[in-house]
Image (cartoon, rainbow, N blue to C red):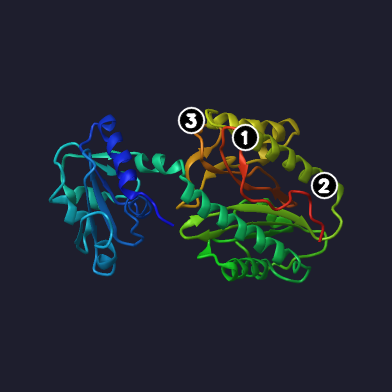
Amino acid sequence: MTFDYAARRERLAGLLPAHEVQALLVTSPENVRYLTGLASSNAAVLVRADGSALLATDNRYIDVARALDVPAVEAADVAGALAGVLEGPGTGIEAASMSVATYRRLGEGLVPLGPVVEVLRAVKDDAELALLRTACELTDQAFADVSQRIAPGMTERDLARLLDNRMTELGADKPAFDTIVAAGENGAIPHHAPTGRELRAGDLVTMDFGARYHGYHADMTRTVCLGPPAAWQRELYDLVVAAQRAGRHALAPGVPAGDVDAAARSVIAEAGHGEHFRHGLGHGVGLQIHEEPFLGPSRTGRLEDRVPITVEPGVYLPGRGGVRIEDTLVTREGGPELFTKTTKELLVL
């Protein structure tokens, strides 16, 4: 899979005058990878307003870096190595990724900026979408394979391990994030960490997981029932299905992010469970599992075309359990494209 990294740097360079800077020192690992192709744990790239750039990394990655389409220098202190070629006053830095200590050490004249590269990353090209589509296919297949083995007596940790192992067996780099498995009352905790709690007949079991493929992250959540659901479980599940459908249908280029959240949240609120939906509706996915844009009640900005994003409403009843349903989709002019295809019908296992 090939990417036009020079074109990405040109697009970034074109944004710099609007931020009143002459260059941007990029230190976020994901942003360095996006702009240069170098995946590492220690690198930085300086991108100037004229589109030229200089990459710095240490001796573990320098040979790879020198084979890229951008000049590279070797240094352990990558930000410090680029400090000598900074453009002086009006040089931007990534406030979210640079430590205060490094900021102070690099000297005056630096301008902390918000998510400049991240905004560029939100809109994906065909190559990125192809990788993300594959990541979602691996996620779907892992669920299909593992769901046949879910049974009372296994623990949350057992089930999480099965999902993780199956994704990597199918070709994933690794799980996209720490897999969530929440059974019974633990389903009321949105980001519950799997424990030794055994699955029991009558449990709702929520699984939030995804595959990472060539650096791109999938994200999907499904809730199943072990045995016939009780009336309250079926009612809760149907409510979340309706809310998730409303959120998916609201996704479109030009729509305010807050409006998409409201479309789903209003369904839950009208059913009397507004206080039981305690997180934002979704987030962008790509080189990070959580990236721009974000869907929530206070989120601003409008969606663009070709943005992969999740829609994941949930209702959580303390002491009883919960339901969350999540898909990864891509905004399109003719309606969102669904990347995670696993059924949203309630699976009774």
Residue 300 is labelled as 3
**Quick check: 12 left or right of 120?**
left
| Residue mark closest to the camera, 1 vs 2 | 1
Residue at 23% x, 52% y is 102
Q: Is residue 170 above or below residue 283?
A: below
The residue depicted at 63 percent of the width and 66 percent of the height is 163
Q: Residues within 10 Å of mark 2 (few under 14, many from 20)?
A: some
Q: Which mark is residue 335?
A: 1
User: Of the residues under marks 1 and 2, which one precedes in the sequence?
Assistant: 2
Which mark's residue is nearer the viewer, 1 or 3?
Answer: 1
Going by the numbered disc 2, the residue's amino acid type is Arg
Q: Quadrant of the C terminus?
A: bottom right
Label 3 neighbour load within 10 Å: few <14, some 14-19, many 20+: some
User: Which numbered circle lies on residue 181?
Assistant: none
Q: CA distance from mark 1 to mark 3?
A: 21 Å
Task: Please give the name of the residue rendered at 39% of the width and 52% of the height, measured from the top-left corner.
Answer: 3
Q: Is residue 76 visible?
A: yes
Residue 54 place in picture, x, y as percent:
21, 52
Q: Residue at x 28, y 58 (%)?
A: 68
Can you identify the residue that label 2 sits on? 234
Circle 1: residue type: Gly
The quarter of the image holding the N terminus is bottom left
Expressed as whole percent of the image width and height from the top left, the position of residue 330 reads 56, 42
- At mark 2, the secondary structure is helix
Check contact, mark 1 vs mark 3: CB within 8 A: no
